[in-house]
Image: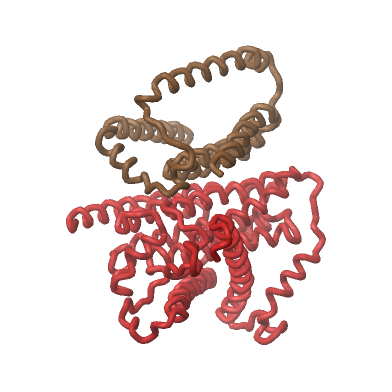
Amino acid sequence: MQIALFTIFGLLAIAGALNLLLQRHPIHSALSLIVVMMSLAVLYWSLGAEFLAAAQVIVYSGAIMVLFVFVIMLLNAGEEEHTRGSRVAAIAGFPGAAAIFCLLSFVFLSERHTFGATRLGESVNGVGSNILQISHVLFTSLLLPFEVTSILILVAILGAVVLARKEL
Amino acid sequence: MTHINPFLLFILLSIVKIAVVLVITLTAVAYTVLLERKVLGRMQNRWGPSRVGPFGLLQPLVDGIKLFLKEDMMPLAVERPLFVAAPIIALGCALVSISMVPFGTRTLVPGTGVDIFQVADINIGLLVILGITSIGVYGIALSGWSSNNKYSLFGSLRATAQMISYELALGLSLVGVVMRAQSLSLRQIVASQSEHGIWSWNIFGGLQIVAFFIYLMAAYAETNRSPFDLPEAESELVAGYHTEYSSMKFAMFFMAEYANMITVACVATLLFFGGAGSPFGHLFDHFGNGWFISAALPVFWFVAKVFAFLLLYIWVRGTVPRFRYDQLMGFGWKFLLPIAMLNILATALALAYHG
């Protein structure tokens, strides 16, 4: 059953990603991206990371993509047009994406012993909740990066306030 | 029962449970509409629907038939696939989240490990409900955009901005409860409040009364209900995001709104009012020990609490006037959010002091 889940949602993610590139209208692209996010959440879930899956749905599909859709709706963005730049992007994009994919998979495969591994279907098979472990790691060994990330977000918020203030 | 494959049995029982819960929820939705019309009517010194059936009790049936038989208009300028998908997303998300709710105490079907009173017991049930609610925004956002109508678009822009803003306060108000229960599973949150009846409920014994009011206000805004019903403010926006919808598509938005109300009432009951626990705790446990009483009484308490919340919804709609939009945003960001954060801080300090 886990294999079936993985196949269905893996294919769905790939189909969504392709649709994202092929659609001409930004709102259809944004909706395909949501499909990708949701399928990724299901994949996380089937790997036993149920907290990550829920966070993926709440943060990415529920907040960030809603803002994307909101901005597209607000600007009333029309269909995209093909320019010179888009042809260059199409020519350079595929080899570039392939190169990044190869590099990432090489790093992950060669360093898999340090990253640790998980098996398909851990949460479905009834292994306990991993929220405790995540929070333990976040507040002990990863405390500094965690706090630095939150400062990064704070800086972004301040920047947004400064930009919005100018127009008042 | 030994000759049936346990996995198959689990699937079959789950399908039966889902069907029963769906039917009960949709009936509850229909009768909440009737309740609202009746109670609002009495508040405004009139009768409300009283012609169809005794006391107007068959009114939901007639309303349903009317909506089914109306012509399903498809305006020419709409974005067709999204226009059709939007009400489905809205209603689907509204109905899925009810599957996490435990309606009674854990009661197993004899011979299996299947719980009668809950469709899915997931150890992050609360997060799943929040996630599904946040997906439900798309139904409203897309309906306004695909309608190609300025009033619809304004309605859905308002709804989207409002729902994102209040989701923060909503999520933060629940953190105190989660810290007290030390779990995100709805069953365990209920179990953490079951010891001494009313005194161990989170709202009284857990001192989460501030969190409860934040939750209540944020949830009213999330479900686009009065006094935060700006997305469908009829004096400004015709009917808001569902202006262009008719027949069953309109009915689906309507059902989604009431299903969301029921979900919010269920979650409030579970998190702050002890779920299916009796307000008297275990005081009267020795009176009825039959299996039927011990299974049905918690369900009765649960339904009574949810009903009280639905009445509160209607009461608020009948009394409080609508907010202005800047007031709504200021209230959410400048008032509810800081108080929710303070509540988390206070709860954490109290827990650290006692623990």
Q: How is the image coloured?
A: by chain
Colour of chain A, in one word, is brown
Q: Tell me the residue at 59%/76% (across/down).
A: B35
B208, above or below B86, in the image: below
User: On the picture, is B132 further left or further right than B90?
Assistant: left
Residue B272 in the figure: left or right of residue B223? left
Q: How many marks?
A: 0
Q: Quadrant of the N terminus of chain B?
A: bottom right
Residue at 73%, 55% in the rendered image:
B245
- Picture coordinates of residue A167, whole percent (x, y): 48, 34
Q: Position of residue B323 (x, y in %)?
A: 51, 59
Q: Nearer the viewer, residue A168 or B346?
A: B346
Q: Is residue B75 visible?
A: yes
Q: Is residue B42 above or below residue A122?
A: below
Query: Residue, x 60% and y 60% (percent of image)?
Result: B12
Which is more toward the observer, B116 or B44? Answer: B116
Q: Residue furthest front?
A: B3
Up-down: is A21 above or below B321? above
From the viewer's perspective, is B330 left or right of B5? left
Q: Name the residue nearer the viewer: B205 or A125.
A: A125
- Residue at image point 22% right, 57% down: B350
Q: Quadrant of the C terminus of chain B?
A: bottom left
Residue at the left extreme? B353
- The x and y percentages for residue B123 are 41, 53
Q: Nearest the camera: B131 or B79?
A: B131
Which image quarter: residue B277?
bottom left
Decide if residue B335 is in sight here.
no
Q: Which chain is red?
A: B
